[in-house]
Image (cartoon, helix red, strand yellow):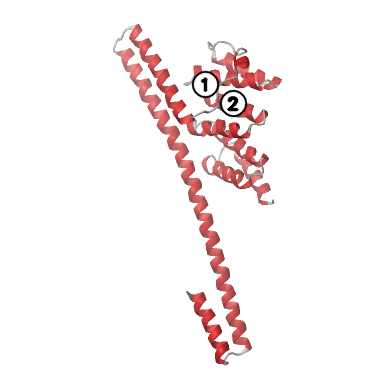
Amino acid sequence: MRYRLLVLALVASVLGGCATKRDLRDLRTEVEVLRDQQAQAMKQLQQQNATILDTIRVKDTRLRGDLSNQLVQIQRQLVQIQELTGQGQQTLSGLREQLRNQEAAIRSSMASGSGGPADTSAAAAVPPAGNPDDVLGTAKGAMQRGSYATARAAYQEFIRSFPQNPRAAEAQLGIGQTYEKTNEPEKALDAYQQVLQLYPNSPSAPTALYRSAMVEVGRDRTTSARSKLEQLLTAYPKSAEAPKAKDELAKLKKR
């Protein structure tokens, strides 16, 4: 409103013939100052909106993971209660099986396709799920050899057979890395997103967020990459990936 009044005053002064050159210069200067102030205010508002959106994303990711973990913990406690009250072995086996099925259903509904079905030929190279260390060892060995389909199948087998294992987040991260190696960025991003949704408090979460940003950098999607790096610094400021995220942000700002 003030800007319009100044413009009207300038026009009125010119038409009235009573404005000096100095008056006109002063009016023009004030008009330009107001215009710059409006532009700066708009820019600050846009930055505030972006910050709010990032905060919402972080809280949503943490909430999803916390709810899933709480449900799993409740069901584990139910099994422990049944054991303490002297239920028969057959009943306990049924409860454990039900627990595994429910956990798988929770993860499946939240993941909605975290890594896709394992390739049949690759799955044949994965040992039967008896020892979790053996399955992860197979996956990592296949990664080192460049057998990414075999590695992916082993990681998927680990998550299917040992969903409660603390290293399940590591296996989900590995699925994303195999897709990166086979140049499938969309599937890699989906797999990394599952790490954030299912295991937001694991050491693999900031790694997944950093790798997601690097995938976006590789596709020249600077805005998305910058958003993910800023999210990493906000949610995991003390992680090992935080210094690397700062460096990448500095590089992106120079583009």
Residue 63 place in picture, x, y as percent: 43, 37
Q: Residue at x 48, y 50 (%)?
A: 52
Question: Disc 2 vs disc 1: Cβ atoms closer than 8 Å?
Answer: yes
> Could you say which is closer to the camera, residue 101 or residue 16?
16
The answer to which of 170 and 34 lies nearer the viewer is 34
* Residue visible at 56% across and 89% down in the picture: 15
- Outermost residue on the left side: it is 85
Q: Amino acid at mark 2?
A: Ile
Mark positioned earlier in the residue sequence (2 or 1)? 1
Q: Quadrant of residue 98?
A: top left
SS at mark 2?
helix
Kind of residue at disc 1: Ile
**Residue 120 position in % (x across, y down):** 60, 16
- Against 31, residue 73 (above or below) is above
Residue drawn at (54%, 55%) of the image: 47
In the rendered image, residue 51, in percent from the top left (x then y), is placed at: 51, 50
Q: Where in the figure is residue 191, as x and y percent of width and height? A: 56, 30
Residue 175 disc label: 2
Q: Residue at x 45, y 40 (%)?
A: 60
Q: CA distance from mark 2 to mark 1?
A: 10 Å
Q: Regarding mark 1 in the picture, which secondary structure is present there? A: helix
Q: Residue 215: give its label.
A: none
For label 1, the residue is: 159
| Looking at the image, residue 39 lies above or below residue 164 | below
